[in-house]
Amino acid sequence: MNSLFMFRRIVSLYQNLYKTSSISSSSLSSREIYSRMKKLIDSKEYKKTLDFFDQQSHSCTDFEINLALKACISLNEYQRGMNIRKKLSQNSLNNPYIQTTLIQFYSESFISSIIQLLLDCDLVMSIMLTVYSLQLPINQIISMQLCLISNNMPTKVLDLFDEMNIEPNQAILAALFSACSRVANDRAMKIGRKLLNRIPKNFLNDDKLLTSAINILMRFGDVSSAENLFQTIEKKDIVAYGAMMKGYIQNNMCDEALDLFEEIPLNLSDVSYTIIFNACAQLSTDRAMKIGRKLLNQMPKNFLNDNKLLTSAINMLMRFGDVSSAENLFQMIQKKNIITYGTMTNGYNINNEPLKSLKLFEDMKRDDINADAIVLIILIGACARIGMLSKCQSIVAQIPLHFYENQRIRNFINSYGKAGSVKDAQKIFKSIDKPDVVTYTAMINSFGLNRMDSEAVDLYRKMPNNLQDEVSSVCVLNACSHSGLLNEAHSIFNEVSHKTKKIISAMLLEDYEKSNPPYSAMYMAILSGARSSHNSILSEKIYLRMKSLFPDQKDALISGSILLCNIYSSLAGLSWTEVNGEIVQFKAHDRSHSRSKEIYADAERISSELIKHGHNYDSSWITRPLHENETIESVLCAHSERLAIAFNFIQETKPSFIQITKNLRVCGDCRNLSIIFL
């Protein structure tokens, strides 16, 4: 089929959409019909809406037909919508409300399908210009614009605008605002501001157009202008409030979004709930948690069928740390999609539940839902937390080859580094042509985790200066501290132009000791600062230095141990180990495993063997008072890493390989235990 013939066919099909017919109406019953249909639409009962419309179609007016078309849009019932559209008269087609619905209907159905078929032919712009050259009605051009936007081609809308020598009406302006906000580059900002400055005064009464303008201003970061425009809207609807709240969130002003929410005098829509849940999730403050939970409890029951809304609620609960409630909400969703699974998987990672993330991945495969790049990146994060080599290799083997074009997918380096396989990490690093900052940092961190500190420094030196940031600097400084490479650490520290709090903390101890005599009060101050930033690694390092320098200052050491205890209690210590393909997670004093009695019995057996070989338990690693019936030995033997070791021995008497990973630093007594085993 040649291009010219294709153009004619498309234009012919397109013009056929506007053939007219007439309808009869009955003013006596239309109000009742409209009221019933409106209630069904508001309750998202679209099929019932259409069934009722079919029964009453002989008495329907434009208002009821408009609602029926909206139901068809929600159900993606194109053919049914075309039959309903034939009931409209030519006068009805001039109704702006009908026009708006038809534009949405066409853009999401027939025209969308045509353009999708032609995308590979690169004829989209030619078709657009052909339609325009035939001087078709302006609403047809508008629908084509919106169609291009719906096909993720907003730049084409801006191209078309440059070709059009007309004064845009409200609908075209709204379409252009939408395109500009989606593109949001310099060209789009220039066009958008030009359009905003040239809005005719008579358009300023169009609340929907002003809402579109608010959206574009917020997208450009011009919050003040958006607020001023919002105040000019006399009858603010829930859509206008939503545009403002969404804009505040986009500009990291979530508190302002909640302030505005508390002023809303209207019933909330499903979109409003989603926006507010997102604001609460980002803040996760006491106020945000109170608002989010109250709103979730008050949510209308008919909204419980909205997957998008429930997914935003799940994300909010996960951000609040309420994993149990998020799981309950997740189970309520009957048709789970990749976004729902991705939100849950990410939520488990946020709440330090990487095992559940990996379990959910298996559930996805069972439900025939293929992981996308986003979910795979989240799974990579779960593997990095657990650090089990076999699990990392298993996930890598399941990643489709075409996903490796995504550099973030290829950044499995951190996972392999934490799993102790530096060779695998280096293999991936070398396969990337142009490593980004994440890739470099992951490799530096992998070297540091595996005591390859010189290699970490060498790679940092090779890293382009423009890629060096706070995270990469902290990683290399920590690597230096592991092996006492103080000269290299000071050299790197002095080269950093912008020294953030984290970078300074990484060098704090060495810098202090270089120019000050030992003084326990100063170390306590530094330890207190490390506690405030929840830096468990630095805190432990400071406490060990205090024990070395001030062994006789018992009061200072007790105070220091209490501070260290507070840090550890705020970060639950977890250990993972894998035996025969099963990954098991342990907490300190954990008795949740089905073979818990055997695990503790073997831990005691190992302890007895260690004592026979001269091991003395170090009580300084106990950072809390002993409870009744507790001993130094019983407390230390119940550390999560000890339980993981015992689990390996009850599975196999003489295991050839034991791998244990931990989310916090291993205590000194357990570290000595591992040395004895080696």
Image (tube, rainbow, N blue to C red):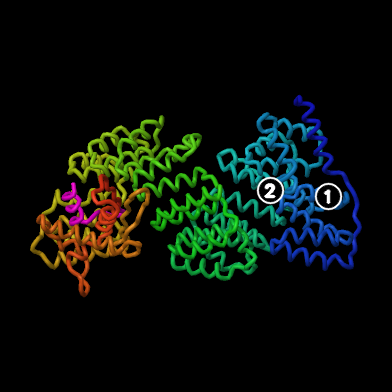
Q: x%, y% of residue 124?
A: 69, 33
Residue 174, numbered label: 2
For the residue marked with disc 2, what is the amino acid? Answer: Ala
The answer to whether any part of residue 167 appears in the image is no
Q: Are marks 2 and 1 in contact (CB under 8 Å)?
A: no
Q: Residue placed farthest to the front in the image?
A: 653
Q: Residue at x 73, y 43 (%)?
A: 168
In reply to whether residue 204 is colored magenta, the answer given is no
Q: Along the horizontal axis of the image, is 521 left or right of 139?
A: left
For the residue marked with disc 1, what is the amino acid? Answer: Asn
In reply to whether residue 664 is colored magenta, the answer given is yes
Q: x%, y% of residue 503?
A: 29, 48
Marks 2 and 1: which is nearer the front? 1
Categorize mark 1 by other alpha carbons within 10 Å: few (<14), some (14-19), many (20+). Answer: few
Q: Exactly how many numbered labels are in the figure?
A: 2
Q: Secondary structure at mark 2?
A: helix
Q: Along the horizontal axis of the image, is 384 left or right of 654?
A: right
Q: x%, y% of residue 210?
A: 66, 54
Categorize mark 2 by other alpha carbons within 10 Å: few (<14), some (14-19), many (20+). Answer: many
Q: Which residues are magenta?
A: 662-678
Q: Residue at x 37, y 34 (%)?
A: 428
Nearer the N terminus, badge 2 or badge 1?
Answer: 1
Q: Nearer the viewer, residue 101 or 262?
A: 101
Residue 83, numbered label: 1
Name the quadrant containing residue 454.
Answer: top left
